[in-house]
Image: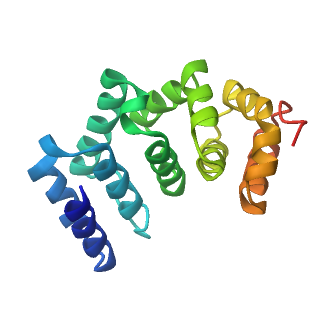
Amino acid sequence: DYHRNNHILNMRKERKWEDILMLYEKEWESYSNKNYSCTFVALSRARTFDNSNPKFRSFLNDLVSRVENEGYEWLGNLQMGNVLESIGKMGLTTPTVKRLLSVVQSKDCSKWIVEKGQTQTVANVAWALARLNCNAEIFFEEVNRQAEWLTTEGNAQDIASVVWACGMLRVRCCPNI
């Protein structure tokens, strides 16, 4: 994981977006949750990335299929936040992304993200949901249940991201923040 992620980050620094996807295409069978997350974060840094690229579509579909087949826990909480934030930055609204968002909007996954995640992960997911105009009321209900934790443990940026997301989505389920 560590060496592959370093390689991905070095390619990102050199803006070798296609090379990142070719690495995935070559080594996909051994990609871990952290490799998927690192790849998404790297690709989200591209200013003019073509998300209709067949290699990217395959990468995205493979990730979502693994989450659907192996469960959201497989991806990991921090990685889920990073992937969703990257999807939000890229403005992806494909049917494949909607499949992932439907998993995130489930009560079990929403509760898992909020209860097991760090405040920054919760903020990243909230921001991404708003950026993608995905009104995930169940997620924000879970955020409200953990509002004291978020405001006590989170920093100003985390809290601001959640409040911004609630405002953008016109979600009224976060009055405790």
Q: Is residue 84 above or below residue 22?
A: above
Residue 79 at x, y percent in the picture: 43, 47
The residue lying toward the viewer, choosing from 82 and 100, is 82
Residue 141 at x, y percent in the picture: 75, 27
- Which residue is pictured at 41% across the width and 59% down the height? 41
The residue lying toward the viewer, choosing from 139 and 78, is 78
Q: Quadrant of residue 174?
A: top right
Residue 9 at x, y percent in the picture: 31, 70
Q: Is residue 90 above or below residue 125?
A: below
Q: Is residue 139 above or below residue 46?
A: above
Q: Quadrant of the N terminus?
A: bottom left
Residue 108 at x, y percent in the picture: 56, 20
**Position of residue 138 in the picture relative to residue 30 (left or right):** right
- Which residue is pictured at 23% across the width and 41% down the height? 58
The residue lying toward the viewer, choosing from 149 and 172, is 149
**Position of residue 136 in the picture relative to residue 64 (left or right):** right
How many callouts does the rendering have?
0
**Position of residue 106 in the picture relative to residue 10 (left or right):** right
The residue lying toward the viewer, choosing from 74 and 136, is 74
Q: Quadrant of residue 148?
A: top right
Q: Is residue 129 visible?
A: yes
Q: Quadrant of the C terminus?
A: top right
Q: Is residue 163 visible?
A: no
- Which residue is pictured at 26% across the width and 36% down the height? 62
